[in-house]
């Protein structure tokens, strides 16, 4: 069996969840970092445009980041705000239940892999490899370095090849419904993570892997 985890919103919390703390730590007015996606109950116009297919997920996050910088959010020497937020001293962006699932899976002999579109671009390889959760993954597949992105079917074919197991033996967790559907289409056991109830996805994935 194999476990594939997306990173943003899955293994790491979403920027929505750490924005308030980032503002507090930097003495910024509330909502300097705009938008809280599904936490805003329809009051995030840029997120609504993403849901309508007018913006990609990447365009949504970078658009929010650019607006936040215009509002006065500090970069602290980082190339963009996404990196500044997640690498802010005082913030631990890891999602504990996701990290624990990866640890348990690897300890049980499950092949583990990161399957992400923007991790290295947003956070940089040096920071990623320094994280406590990085050793829990046997394979790192990042579209930034591969040149093809989810939900392109070639991305799924490529990660299956990198993991070295049949697609049917892979449990894939992602927060984007289109990417989850891409996993289903590729023959994976794909699990949708709802950011409002993230731990449910890890429980389901653990059961599919036979870890419970």
Image (cartoon, rainbow, N blue to C red):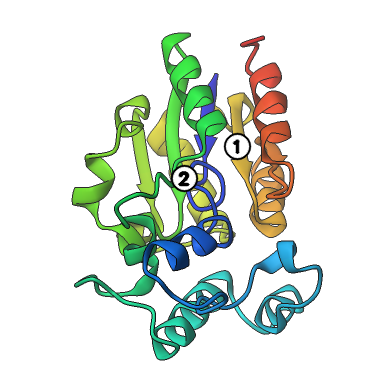
Image-quadrant location for residue 129: top left
Calculate the distance from the C-alpha at mark 2 to the C-alpha at mark 1.
Answer: 8 Å
Which residue corresponds to the image point at 46% horizontal and 82% vertical from the top-left? Answer: 68
The percent position of residue 198, horizontal first and vertical second, equals: 67, 40
Q: Which residue is mark 2?
A: 115
Viewer-nearest residue: 167 or 25: 25
Image-quadrant location for residue 145: bottom left
Please report contact status of discs 2 and 1: CB closer than 8 Å, yes or no: yes
For residue 172, which numbered disc appears in the image?
A: 1
**Image height of 172 relative to 44, above or below:** above
Image-quadrant location for residue 122: bottom left
Which residue in the rendered view is the most extreme toward the front?
A: 27
Image quadrant in which the C terminus is located: top right
**As drawn, is 8 to the left or to the right of 176?**
left
Give SS at disc 2: strand
Image quadrant in which the N terminus is located: top right
Viewer-nearest residue: 113 or 104: 104
The percent position of residue 128, horizontal first and vertical second, equals: 28, 46
The percent position of residue 109, horizontal first and vertical second, equals: 44, 10
Which residue corresponds to the image point at 45% horizontal and 88% vertical from the top-left? Answer: 71
**Image height of 105 relative to 131, above or below:** above
**As drawn, is 15 to the left or to the right of 106?**
right
**As drawn, is 79 to the left or to the right of 190?**
left
Which residue corresponds to the image point at 53% horizontal and 63% vertical from the top-left? Answer: 20
């Amino acid at each position: 069996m194999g476990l594939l985890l997306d990173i943003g919103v899955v293994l790491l919390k979403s920027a929505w969840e750490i924005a308030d703390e980032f503002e507090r730590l930097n003495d910024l007015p509330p909502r300097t970092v705009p938008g809280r996606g599904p936490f805003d109950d329809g009051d995030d116009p840029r997120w609504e445009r993403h849901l309508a297919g007018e913006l990609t997920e990447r365009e949504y996050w970078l658009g929010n980041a650019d607006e936040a910088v215009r509002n006065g959010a500090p970069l602290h020497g980082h190339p963009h705000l996404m990196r500044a937020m997640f690498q802010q001293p005082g913030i631990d962006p890891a999602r504990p239940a996701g990290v624990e699932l990866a640890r348990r899976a690897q300890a049980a002999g499950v092949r583990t892999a990161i399957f992400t579109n923007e991790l290295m671009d947003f956070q940089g390889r040096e920071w990623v490899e320094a994280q406590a959760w990085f050793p829990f993954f046997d394979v790192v597949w990042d579209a930034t370095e591969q040149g093809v992105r989810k939900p392109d079917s070639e991305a799924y074919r490529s990660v299956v090849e990198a993991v070295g197991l049949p697609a049917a033996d892979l449990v894939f967790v992602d927060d984007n419904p289109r990417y989850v559907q891409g996993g289903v289409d590729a023959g994976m056991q794909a699990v949708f993570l709802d950011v409002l109830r993230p731990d449910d996805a890890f429980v389901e994935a653990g059961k599919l892997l036979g870890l419970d």
